[in-house]
Image: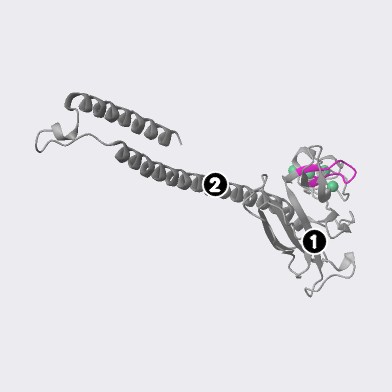
Amino acid sequence: MKNIIKAAKRYAESAMRQMGHAATNAESFGNDADLAPGMASAFTLVELLIGMVISLIAMSSLYGTHVCQQKAAMVQEEIVGVQQNIRVAMYHMEREFRMAGCDPTGSAGAGIVTAGSNSIAFTSDITGGEGDGIDNDNDGSIDEADEAGFSDGACNDSNEDITYGLFTDTDGIQKLGRKSPSTAAYLPIAENIDALNFVYLNASGGVAATISDIRSIQITLVARANRADNGYTDTSQYLNQQGTSIMPIPNDNFRRKLLTTEVRCRNLGL
Ligand SMILES: [Ca+2]
Ligand SMILES: [Ca+2]
Ligand SMILES: [Ca+2]
Ligand SMILES: [Ca+2]
């Protein structure tokens, strides 16, 4: 835009100079008939006007191209942001769902606690050996500092009782939240999450009828851009892997991305 203004300024200055010359020429020579043979006259007013119109058209077209490019870059930036956001959300869930039900001692009772279509709570026993008074690594001494990575037969240590779900923060933005223990408040994992959907599958890949049948989880997420794009309307239908719609058709101006995956919970059903 700056360049266009500069160019216009230069053009106007040169036009003014030309008009100055034209005036001087007119004063000196009276009219074109006074010009010596072969000597070109200055621009006429009509020529100047035509020149200005042509350059205005050129400038507006340049400006239009510039605006288009800027908008395309902004849209691209928004889409990349949404993709990163949704991948981070998925990464955290996948990693922790794989550990759901991890119970090496077999006495912690770890597993999925609640299996909702848009929230899940599960436990695992992955630590606690550093404070249980037991020789977890069987090296003949209760060297607790050395035993932090050992399970203690209970799901009451930090990050052993986890809930994922959607919540709306004080800023009014819906987010993917995680809490541990399940009685705590949600902490945000990813912003602008419009839909979160879980489908629980049994050992043969069918939809699990009971919590104890669950062996894998299909996760589907829909995230949206932070800003609305007024030139765009989202009329998409967002479906999970079962073909079920997981949110109403938005019909608004936000760009969205859907990401879906299936996690095998290797600690369940052992
Ligand atoms: Ca534990
Ligand atoms: Ca110990
Ligand atoms: Ca030990
Ligand atoms: Ca040791």
Snapshot quadrant of residue 24: top left
- Vertical order, 134 against 30 (above or below): below
Q: Answer with mark 1 or mark 2, whichever residue precedes in sequence.
A: 2
Which element type, helix, strand or loop, lies under badge 1?
A: strand
Image x and y of residue 258, in percent: 68, 59
Q: What residue is rendered at 25% in x and 29% in y?
A: 22
In the image, 32 versus 241, the foreground residue is 32
Image x and y of residue 269, in percent: 83, 66
In the image, 88 versus 124, the foreground residue is 88
- Vertical order, 177 against 217 (above or below): above
Snapshot quadrant of residue 236: bottom right
Between circles 1 and 2, the one closer to the viewer is 2
What amino acid is found at the position of numbered circle 2 in the picture?
Lys
Image x and y of residue 242, in percent: 76, 70
What are the residue bounds of the magenta stretch? 177-188
Query: What residue would you read off at disc 1?
Result: 198
What amino acid is found at the position of numbered circle 1 in the picture?
Phe
Residue 259 lies left or right of residue 186; in this view the side is left
Residue 94 lies left or right of residue 209; in this view the side is left
The tag on residue 71 is 2
In the image, 263 versus 41, the foreground residue is 41
Q: Would you call the spot at circle 2 few (<14 residues within 10 Å), some (14-19), or many (20 or more)?
A: few
Is 106 covered by the magenta stretch? no
Let me know if residue 74 appears in the view. Answer: yes
Q: What residue is rendered at 63% in x and 52% in y?
A: 83
